[in-house]
């Protein structure tokens, strides 16, 4: 599931980059070939701005998803499940709390 989200985000970002590149080369191309009308250029610009905003959000999620994939690769190499890792971290925190309580 994590990898499928990663692949979807990559495909979306590449698609957005290709549409942006074609728009930069020939802004009228989107009107003539895709939307099949020549008036109301504002709709194209609004669509492009929306695409860029969604690409920015997708890049953020891509960064987070890559971190999650790398974390799970780390867990696989250690032979741990996510639950085991979380339990181990909680046990360490509890041990530190007990040491602080003993010192005080």
Image (cartoon, rainbow, N blue to C red):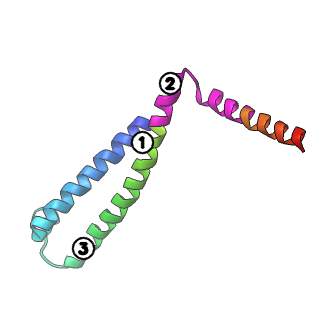
Q: Residue at x 35, y 47 (%)?
A: 9
Describe the element under mark 1 as helix, strand or loop: helix
Q: Are marks 1 and 3 in contact (CB under 8 Å)?
A: no
Q: Which residues are magenta?
A: 70-91
Does residue 78 show up magenta in the picture?
yes
Quadrant position of residue 53: bottom left
In front: 17, or 97? Answer: 97
Asked whether residue 92 appears in the rendered view, the answer is yes
Q: Is residue 17 above or below residue 11?
A: below
Task: Pinpoint residue 94: horizontal percent, then vertical percent.
Answer: 78, 36
Measuring from the top left, give residue 102's x and y in whole percent: 89, 38
The residue identified by callout 2 is: 76
Residue at horizontal 46 percent and vertical 29 percent from the top: 73
Residue at 26% of width from left, 67% of height from top?
48
Quarter in which the N terminus is drawn: top left
Q: Does residue 31 belong to the magenta stretch?
A: no
The label on residue 45 is 3
Q: Residues within 10 Å of mark 1 (few under 14, many from 20)?
A: some
Cα separation, mark 2 vs mark 1, equals 15 Å
CA gap between label 1 and label 3 equals: 31 Å
Q: Residue furthest top?
A: 79
């Amino acid at each position: 599931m994590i990898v499928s989200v990663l692949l979807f985000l990559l495909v979306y970002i590449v698609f957005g980059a290709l549409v942006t590149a074609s728009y930069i080369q020939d802004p009228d191309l989107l009107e003539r070939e895709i939307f099949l009308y020549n008036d109301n250029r504002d709709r194209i610009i609004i669509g492009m701005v929306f695409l860029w905003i969604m690409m920015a959000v997708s890049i953020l999620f891509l960064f987070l998803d890559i971190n999650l994939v790398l974390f799970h690769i780390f867990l696989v190499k250690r032979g741990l499940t996510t639950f085991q890792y979380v339990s181990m971290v909680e046990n360490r925190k509890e041990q530190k709390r007990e040491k602080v309580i003993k010192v005080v």
